[in-house]
Image: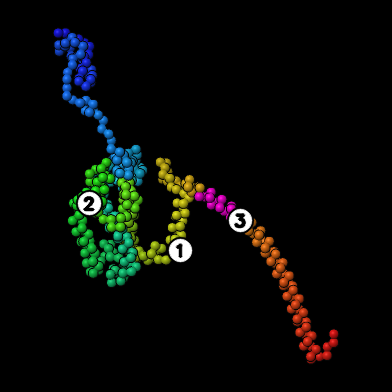
Amino acid sequence: FTAPKSTTTITTKTSLALPVVADPSIPQIKNDSIKYETDVDVENKFKVKEVDPAILDPKKRVQTGRYNDKKMSIAVPFLKRPNKLDGTHAGDVGFDPLGLSESNDLYTMMEAELRHSRLAMLAVIGWPLSELYAPNWMLHGKMHLAPSVLNGFDPLSFIAVAAIFGGFGYLEYKTSLRRTDDKRIGMKHKEDMANVWKYGVPGDYNFDPLNLYSAFGDTADGRKAMRELEVAHGRSAMLGITAFAAWEALTGHPIVENSMFFHPNALLPTLALAYLGFGFFYEIEDSDQYLFQIKQSSEGAGRIERIKNGLNYMKEDAIEYAAIATEVGGNYAEKFGTVSNDLKQKYDQLTQDYTKKVMSKNYDVSE
């Protein structure tokens, strides 16, 4: 036996050749190749598995990491984007200045936000309606304010509010550990979120009696768009109901008093039309250098150009029609003038004849 310094090739039954560095301390056989037989199917062993196309299809699966390429938060541009807030979930714009998503379970935090959002959407409608239409004995104080923690309660309103919140509390207690993946909507959520986690979607109560959840399409991205809409409305409602409570606590007057939102007026429609008109021609552009920039959108430029063309056509048509109207009006004016002169002559003749007739009876008038 000798120990060659060259490499030795191991050949298997499947013709897989692997270079092996010989150890000088181990005696080696002079044969250039040593053949071993094995039952391992190397082609299947090392075969790359095909990727399910559904994984990359946004209509079938929610895609992860929408903001992975962004280091800074979209909502708070001077702060870094929180690690868990990568744009995967509905309503995620990277807003977490207190770092709650890092120290708490993300699913639990999303569930809590949705519950508060839904309560706020009910409250932001019920608060002004109660002050507008509820009898005074159901409201609080001389100014007839909606009962609340800051405004205070009367005995009857306190019992009613306690009963309502007791019902909501019981509902949350019974549904806090609910299972949703065996329900109709829950099974869709499980498939939608398969790329993200196994927990489905927070806030799922399998409640959609009007089938509005598929308004944007019965697809994963369509359902996510509807969840985005709910979260956006819920956050606006939470801000709104907080503003209602703060306003009444500071001023002592109901929120519906002297408000353009709750009484007929021209100001609110004017502001709404101005807002719609602004969005029709302009857009707000994000910028790393400025807080925001207002620029004319390409669609807005096209609309303005179409309006200008339309006005030019209207101007040309107006000039043409004005010329025709002037000509026709001149003809009618000439005819009217002729008729007027004839009528005047006849009237003068009748007057003269009548005068002569009357004078001839009373006086001796000769021509």
| Residue kind at label 1, given as amino acid type | Ala
Q: Secondary structure at mark 3?
A: helix
Q: x and y percent of residue 321 in the render?
A: 63, 58
Residue at the extreme bottom = 362
| Real-space Cα separation, disc 1 to disc 3, in angstroms | 34 Å
Q: Secondary structure at mark 2?
A: loop
Q: x and y percent of residue 153 in the render?
A: 25, 66
Magenta-span inclusion, residue 309:
yes
Q: Is residue 103 left or right of residue 242?
A: left
- As drawn, the label of residue 183 is 2
> In front: mark 1 or mark 3?
3
- Name the residue at 69% across, 66% down: 332
Q: Read off the residue under disc 1.
A: 266
- Point out the image quarter for the C terminus: bottom right
- Name the residue at 30% across, 55% down: 211
Q: Secondary structure at mark 1?
A: loop
From this viewpoint, is residue 228 visible? no
Residue 324 placement: quadrant: bottom right
Badge 1 or badge 3: first in the primary sequence: 1
- Name the residue at 32% across, 60% down: 124
Magenta region, residue range:
303-314
| Real-space Cα separation, disc 3 to disc 2, in angstroms | 64 Å
Q: Is residue 77 above or below residue 8?
A: below
Q: Read off the residue under disc 3.
A: 317
Overall secondary structure of the magenta section? helix
Magenta-span inclusion, residue 52:
no
| Residue kind at label 2, given as amino acid type | Lys
- Name the residue at 53% across, 50% down: 306
